[in-house]
Image (cartoon, rainbow, N blue to C red):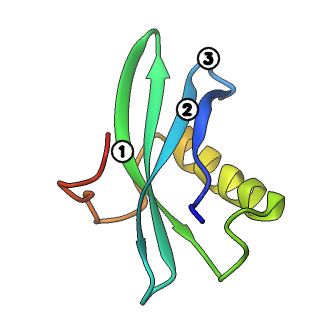
C-alpha cells in the first residue's frame, strides 16, 4: 500500500494550480508529508505540507478526499505548515 498521489492539476481560485507527491511518513507522530508543487503563470514553486494521518486505509476514497482538502488549503495559503524541509532522498 502507498499513500495517494495527486498528479493531476487541482485549480485554486486565483488561477494557480497544485499537484502533490507523497514525500514521507512519520509513524511515531502520525504525520504524512507531501511535496506540493504550485504553478502560477507557468512557473512552479515547491513546498512541503504536513498532513494528519489517523490510521485510515491508505487506499480509501475518504483518506484521498481528506488529504486533498488539506493539501488544497496549504496550496491556497502558498506557504508550508511545517519546519520539516523534506528528505534529501525523496523523489522529486
Name the residue: 44% across, 34% down: 37
Within 10 Å of the Cα at label 1, are there few (<14), some (14-19), or many (20+) other Cα atoms?
many
On screen, 37 above or below 70? above
Task: Judge from the rendering whether residue 7 lies leftward or rightward of residue 85; answer left or right.
Answer: right
Q: Nearer the viewer, mark 3 or mark 1?
A: 1
Q: Is residue 83 above or below residue 68?
A: below
Instruction: Give residue 81's quadrant in the image.
Output: bottom left
Q: Residue furthest top?
A: 41
Query: In the rendered view, would you say 53 is above or below 50?
Result: below
- Residue that badge 3 annotates: 15
Where residue 4 sits in the image (x, y, percent)? 62, 53
Q: Quadrant of the N terminus?
A: bottom right
Total marks in image:
3
Residue carrying label 2: 18
Q: Which mark is residue 14?
A: none
Q: Secondary structure at mark 3?
A: loop
Name of the residue lying farthest toward the bottom: 28
| Labelled pair 3, 2 in contact (Cβ < 8 Å) | no
Look at mark 1 in the image and give the residue it sits on.
47
Q: Quadrant of residue 27?
A: bottom left
Residue at 73% from the left image edge and 73% from the top image edge: 57
The image quadrant where one finds the C terminus is top left
At 60% across and 41% down in the image, what residue appears?
6
Query: Which residue occupies the extreme left position in the image?
Result: 88
Distance between mark 3 and mark 1 Cα atoms: 18 Å
Residue 52 as seen in the image, left or right of residue 85: right
Q: Residues within 10 Å of mark 2 (few under 14, many from 20)?
A: many
Amino acid at each position: 500500500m502507498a499513500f495517494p498521489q495527486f498528479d493531476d492539476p487541482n485549480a485554486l481560485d486565483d488561477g494557480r494550480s497544485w499537484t502533490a507527491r507523497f514525500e514521507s511518513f512519520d509513524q511515531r507522530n502520525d504525520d504524512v508529508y507531501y511535496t506540493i508543487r504550485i504553478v502560477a503563470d507557468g512557473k512552479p514553486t515547491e513546498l512541503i505540507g504536513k498532513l494528519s494521518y489517523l490510521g485510515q486505509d491508505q487506499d480509501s476514497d475518504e483518506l484521498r478526499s481528506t488529504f486533498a482538502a488539506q493539501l488544497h488549503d496549504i496550496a491556497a495559503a502558498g506557504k508550508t505548515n511545517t519546519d520539516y524541509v523534506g528528505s534529501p532522498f525523496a523523489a522529486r
